[in-house]
Image (cartoon, rainbow, N blue to C red):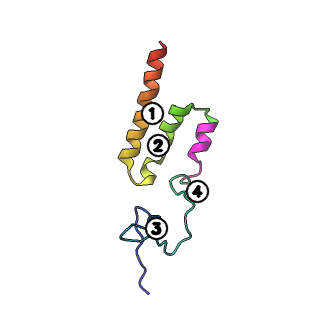
Amino acid sequence: MKEKKVCIRCHGASKDCPICKGQKLNEEKEDMVNNPKHYTFGTIEVIDVIEDWQLEFHEGNCVKYIARAKHKGNELEDLKKAQWYLNRRIEQLEKEK
């Protein structure tokens, strides 16, 4: 039997997708709140690193977006988000001088 293709971008999460039409094939439905694939790659979750290192909001978001950039589908967008948070933190520190 010929295996049907699933969209590599939405993995069946979008009902409007012309490729997969929201149908996940040959796998269980992904939990996009608690365990999306871009959260659970590797052996350490990003949230655990952020909490362990006690990073503040802006720093934590930088780490989050950089760590997940290659796993979400739009690396450049996520790196720009990290840059935005980093620039914002730098502006805060410069104002404190």
Secondary structure state at the residue bearing disc 3: loop
Which amino acid is tagged 3? Gly
Using the numbered discs, state the Cα–Cα distance from disc 4 to disc 3 in whole angstroms: 15 Å
Tell me if mark 2 has few (under 14), some (14-19) or many (20+) residues whose alpha carbon lies within 10 angstroms of its own.
many
Where residue 40 appears, as percent x and y from the top left, is 56, 54
Q: Nearer the viewer, mark 2 or mark 3?
A: 3
Which amino acid is tagged 2? Tyr
Residue picked out by circle 2: 65
Which amino acid is tagged 1? Tyr
Residue picked out by circle 3: 12
Mark 2–mark 3 CB contact (< 8 Å)? no
Label located before the other in sequence (1 or 2): 2
x 50%, y 53%: residue? 38
Which residue is at the far front?
A: 16
Mark 4–mark 3 CB contact (< 8 Å)? no
Where residue 91 appears, as percent x and y from the top left, is 43, 22
Tell me if mark 1 has few (under 14), some (14-19) or many (20+) residues whose alpha carbon lies within 10 angstroms of its own.
some
Whether 46 is among the magenta residues is yes
Pick the residue in front: 68 or 97.
97
Whether 12 is among the magenta residues is no
x 40%, y 61%: residue? 9
x 48%, y 44%: residue? 67
Residue picked out by circle 1: 85
Pick the residue in front: 15 or 38.
15
Mark 1–mark 2 CB contact (< 8 Å)? yes
Where residue 23 appears, as percent x and y from the top left, is 47, 73
Q: Which residues are magenta?
A: 42-51
Q: Is residue 55 above or below residue 8?
A: above
